[in-house]
Amino acid sequence: MPVEVPGRVLDENQVDFWVLPEDALCRDNLPEGMRADVLIVPESRFLTLRIASALAKRPADSVIFINSRPRWIPDAGGAEERRLLELLGRCKVCGLDQLGECCRELGLCAGVAEPRFEQLHIYRYWKDGVWDYMVFNESADKTFCGTIAFPDGWQAELTLHPFDSVVFHDRAVVE
């Protein structure tokens, strides 16, 4: 499954995400402010030994496979492959069509728009010791008028016309 398939679903549900390169995942070496509390793994029939080993080291509830778990680790030997597949078998599987709801239940949304507006994207990034948020209306013809509830407990009333955006730093609008 191409990463942009679940990426689009995550965008439409206001879930901010990063695509982790293999080295960052396997070394657990993420840049400052970047966290990987939950890893969402696109549907795949197999994983490499390196990736499977990195995922198996994580708590089972921090890995979600889309649609199905991998069934094969081609560069692992029989016993090692069985061991890793057993460990990965404890991880959650979520259908692509349920991914947005699953992420909401886990509190992974960068913000929750009310009313729901699929073309509203919320990006969260770490700057100067606080989370900043950029809210962008990707629609070419619809205006968003509503409330965004952010995960750290505050809300903002917004009207964003097509292609408008706003940036919040420490809960204040950046001009």
Image (cartoon, rainbow, N blue to C red):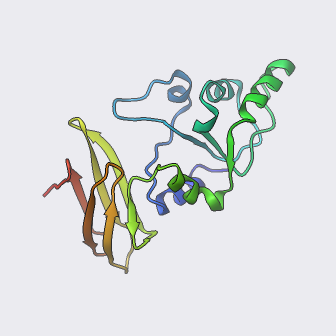
Kindly identify the residue that appears in the image at 20 percent across and 36 percent down: 128
Q: Identify the residue at image location x=48%, y=63%.
A: 12
| Position in image of residue 145 (x %, y %) | 30, 76
Q: Position of residue 31 (x, y in %)?
A: 38, 29
Residue 88 percent coordinates (x, y): 72, 33
Of residue 155 and residue 49, the one placed in the foreground of this image is 155
Q: Quadrant of residue 122?
A: bottom left
In the image as oriented, which residue stretches furthest toward the bottom? 141
Number of residue marks: 0
**Residue closer to the observer: 102 or 121:** 102
Is residue 68 shown above or below 147?
A: above
In this rendering, is residue 38 above or below 110?
above
Q: Could you say where residue 125 lies in the image, as x and y percent from the top left?
A: 32, 44
153 relative position to 3: left or right: left
**Residue farthest along the left direction in this orientation:** 175
| Quarter where residue 97 is shown | bottom right
Residue occupying the far front of the picture: 153
Q: Residue at x 58, y 37 (%)?
A: 62
In the visual, does 26 lie left or right of 85?
left
Corner quadrant of residue 34: top left
Q: Quadrant of the C terminus?
A: bottom left
In percent of the image, x 60 and y 30: which residue is there? 59
Please, is residue 31 above or below residue 103 in the view?
A: above
